[in-house]
Image (tube, rainbow, N blue to C red):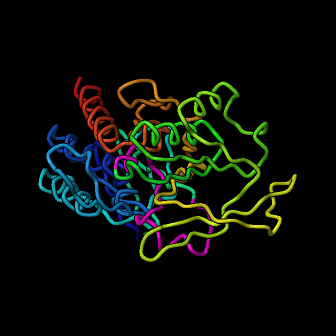
Amino acid sequence: MSQTTHTKCLIIGSGPAGYTAGVYAARAMLEPVLVQGIEPGGQLTTTTEVENWPGDTEVQGPDLMVRMEAHAKAMGCAIVGDIITDLDTESRPFVAKGDSGATYTADAVILATGARAKWLGLESEEAFKGFGVSACATCDGFFYRGQEIVVIGGGMTAIDAAVQSKLLGAENVTLVYRRTQDKMPASEYEQHLAQSKGVHIMSSVAPVALKGEGHVAAIELAYTDENAKPTGETFTLPADQVFKAIGQVFEAVEGLDLDGRKIAVTGAGRTSRKGVWAGGDCTAGEDLTVVAVSEGRDAAEDIHASLMG
């Protein structure tokens, strides 16, 4: 027989938003249960140096998440190594099914399922994750002042990453887009704005390989045809850092729309589903640790007011 656990507050996900929600929910005597999900610790576990976390001049991403988990446990949050595969929010208490076969019932739910950056899919990419390949210009652009930056993508996120890199002091910033420039998702105004800041837009080219010894030093690009497919003709561009801005994959729970664009966050982490709150990257907000922490805290505090009021 499968085990059933009831809690006033079920937290699904274990990044900064989830663990912070666990701390505040435990302090509010909600006896929270946190189910870690497929990637305990979230995207910070694949990050190296973090320099924008208050109180630490520099901290390794995985170490920070270990500390957050320990803090939540110390406050009394029950942390479970399971993956929620189904969530029924049609009636109270809510019912969540775990991959382990366990069942979790809850008076309120906090979704902190996070997101994963889309990767380029290059064979050479894995070796350079954290060593010249990143998905966050705001986080890492500071390290590459006076150096060569390449941004991959054509939407507003890519434009923002390119401009941010330039404003942070990069010597040269090149935005690479596989289709013709007139087909870029970013508007003409946004493109012109980026160019006015010194960003060079290179269209009809696509990345095919990353090069370097221990750290990215260059990116190999191929010209593309009218269907955005590489033609085979390639050239190499110097690159001390490559920022990917081609979108994110939002972690979904069966039974609830969590694609990061349709979920309605109405304030203090509340969603369009009564009794369901959300925080962190799954809300498609700013991809910053301090923002996720704030949203996790807001959700837990609002649940406490809702259940105890």
Left or right: 159, with 302 as reference point: right
Q: Is residue 265 left or right of residue 238?
A: left
Residue at the location (73% across, 52% down)? 178
Q: Nearer the viewer, residue 282 or 303?
A: 282
Residue at 28 percent of width and 53 percent of height: 50
| Residue 232 position (above or below residue 193) | below
Work out whether residue 90 or residue 254 is closer to the camera in this orientation and state it.
254
Quarter of the figure with the C terminus: top left
Q: Which residues are magenta?
A: 119-142
* Quarter residue 269 falls in: top left
| Residue found at the far right of this picture | 226
Q: Is residue 126 magenta?
A: yes
Please name the residue shown 19% across and 43% down the image: 54
> In this picture, is 55 found above or below 304?
below
- The mark total stands at 0
Residue 264, x across and y down, in percent = 52, 30
The image shows residue 230 at horizontal and vertical percentages of 79, 63
| Percent position of residue 221, x then y | 68, 63
Residue occupying the point 24% across, 47% down: 22
Which residue is nearer to you in this view: 284 or 252?
284
- Quadrant for the N terminus, please: bottom left
**Residue 55 pos. (x, y %):** 14, 46
